[in-house]
């Protein structure tokens, strides 16, 4: 590896290592630090290695479509290295060295951390052949460093970092206050990533599945505290819940397609007719609409007895299900209201520990095939009518067979407090 040499050398090289495989990222960390480091501090899914010369954070795979908590990882990454590291490293192992794939990874880092990242980015390849095959990257990203892993990498990194100021996060997508708060939390964590001190909780039993189930919070203030505090990232969450097969994933795809003009043939959220639940874990994706970041959360049927780990999935969903920061779409198939859906809202409230009804819209699917009157259908099903009334009359009808984005715009307008959430000043405030 050879970087241009410089004069001043920073006292310590601080680096964040990204990449697909943990083994290669760890190898890079060890090579830079000059030895296999004994102290490996684990904080959530990050490995921290440090000695007197380097401080390196090995990240979980940010690039995997199935990355469970992308925002949490990004905030953790910023908190661990705030105000900014001396350099970023993208570790390219031999299995993941296709040019397209590497370009997609750099572009993703670009969109997360801003334009300046490429000036601080070293793409380190596994061997000379991969290095040669990726030289074309320099024509597209002129200011990145491209190098092969080698023994004198520490010295090269040190020299390279001496030529530039440390990277500064710009806090455009993630608020500085959130990052600072997270940094404090991480500082309080032990080596195994367990909090030394617990979050404040409205429940005297402390946080945990059973406490949230048994003691629903009574007031808005309590609700706010009892929510899993670690994901206050100001992204607005649209969460689809309901029985299996009602069309949660199909509706998520409709929202995504209309909002992002994504026209790919691949379904982002797998959706099909099946006797078994298709979605078995909470899946998320973030997009921007009306200047606001929105996270779509597709969920499994939490009450389906074929689901292996319902409580784990409810806990995963709780992270996103925050009063004031979410809308719940309770998905019901038109013309097919079942026994299992009687009392579903109350069951969900028992599981989530707050009155989600205040933020719920009933979303009917199969609108195109429903020839009867909706009023008549509801009138004939008192438990369904009760659900809609409990949600203060908020309901909407989707035709998931249609690509018409108007049905999505109309749905968004029914979100309680829609104007504040999506107004210019509201959106700005959420990022401050
Ligand atoms: N015609 C029509 N079909 C729909 C509509 N919405 C969903 N479907 C179909 O209903 C079936 C089930 O939809 P999914 O989106 O997989 O349902 P789900 O609620 O996500 O199911 P699980 O993941 O198993 O919980 C699929 O074949 C969808 O294409 C709709 O509005 N119209
Ligand atoms: Mg599904």
Image (spheres, rainbow, N blue to C red):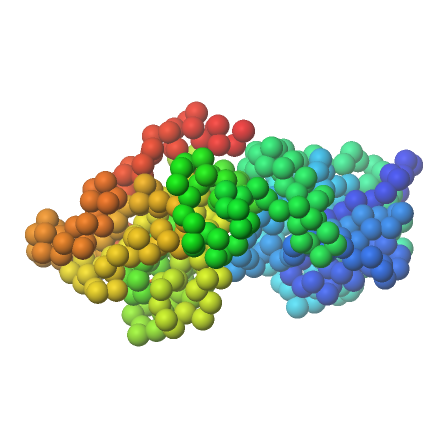
> Can you give x and y, in whole percent of width and height, for residue 145 in the image?
75, 48
x and y, in percent, of residue 354 in the image: 39, 46
Comparing 74 with 332, the one in front is 332
The residue most toward the top is: 425
Q: Residue at the location (33% across, 56% down)?
A: 347
Q: Residue at x 34, y 30 (%)?
A: 419
Q: Residue at x 38, y 50 (%)?
A: 239
Q: Split into 4 quadrants, where in the image is the N terminus?
A: bottom right
| Quadrant location of the C terminus in the rendered image | top right
Where residue 57 sits in the image (x, y, percent)?
A: 73, 51
Nearer the observer, 62 or 135: 62
Using the rendered image of the protein, determine whether residue 111 is visible from the camera's viewpoint: no
Kindly indicate the quadrant of the structure image that contains residue 96: bottom right
Q: Residue at x 19, y 61 (%)?
A: 337
The quarter holding residue 33 reads bottom right
Furthest-front residue in this view: 204
Does 146 appear above or below 300? Answer: above
Q: Residue 152 location, x and y as percent?
A: 89, 55
In the rendered image, is residue 382 in sight?
yes
């Amino acid at each position: 590896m050879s970087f241009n040499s410089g004069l001043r050398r920073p006292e310590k090289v601080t680096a964040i290592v990204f990449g697909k495989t943990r083994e290669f990222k760890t190898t890079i960390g060890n090579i830079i630090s000059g030895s296999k480091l004994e102290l490996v501090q684990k904080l959530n899914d990050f490995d921290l290695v440090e000695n007197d010369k380097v401080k390196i954070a090995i990240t979980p795979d940010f690039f995997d479509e199935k990355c469970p908590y992308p925002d949490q990882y990004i905030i953790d990454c910023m908190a661990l290295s705030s105000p900014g590291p001396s350099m970023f490293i993208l570790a390219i192992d031999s299995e993941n060295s296709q040019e397209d794939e590497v370009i997609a990874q750099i572009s993703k880092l670009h969109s997360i951390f801003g334009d300046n990242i490429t000036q601080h980015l070293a793409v380190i390849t596994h061997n000379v052949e991969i290095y040669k095959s990726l030289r074309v990257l320099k024509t597209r990203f002129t200011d990145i460093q491209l190098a092969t892993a080698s023994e004198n990498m520490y010295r090269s990194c040190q020299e390279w970092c001496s030529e530039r100021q440390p990277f500064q996060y710009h806090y455009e997508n993630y608020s500085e206050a959130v990052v600072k708060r997270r940094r404090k939390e991480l500082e309080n964590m032990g080596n195994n990533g367990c909090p030394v001190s617990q979050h404040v909780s409205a429940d005297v039993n402390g946080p945990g599945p059973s406490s949230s189930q048994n003691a629903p919070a009574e007031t808005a203030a309590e609700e706010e505290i009892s929510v899993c505090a670690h994901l206050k990232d100001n992204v607005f969450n649209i969460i689809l819940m309901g029985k299996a097969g009602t069309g949660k994933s199909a509706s998520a795809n409709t929202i995504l397609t209309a909002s992002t003009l994504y026209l790919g043939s691949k379904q982002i959220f797998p959706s099909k007719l099946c006797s078994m639940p298709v979605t078995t874990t909470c899946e998320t994706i973030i997009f921007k609409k009306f200047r606001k970041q929105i996270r779509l959360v597709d969920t499994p049927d939490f009450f389906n007895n074929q689901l292996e780990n319902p409580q784990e999935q409810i806990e995963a969903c709780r992270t996103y299900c925050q009063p004031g920061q979410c809308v719940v779409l309770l998905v019901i198939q038109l013309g097919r209201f079942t026994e299992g859906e009687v009392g579903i809202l109350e069951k969900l409230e028992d599981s989530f520990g707050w009155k989600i009804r205040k933020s719920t819209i009933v979303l009917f699917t199969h609108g195109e095939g429903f020839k009867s009157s909706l009023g008549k259908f509801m009138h004939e099903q008192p438990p369904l009518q009760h659900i809609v009334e409990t949600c203060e009359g908020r309901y909407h009808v989707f035709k998931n067979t249609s690509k018409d984005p108007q049905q999505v715009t109309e749905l968004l307008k029914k979100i309680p407090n829609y104007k504040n959430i999506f107004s210019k000043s509201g959106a700005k405030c959420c990022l401050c």
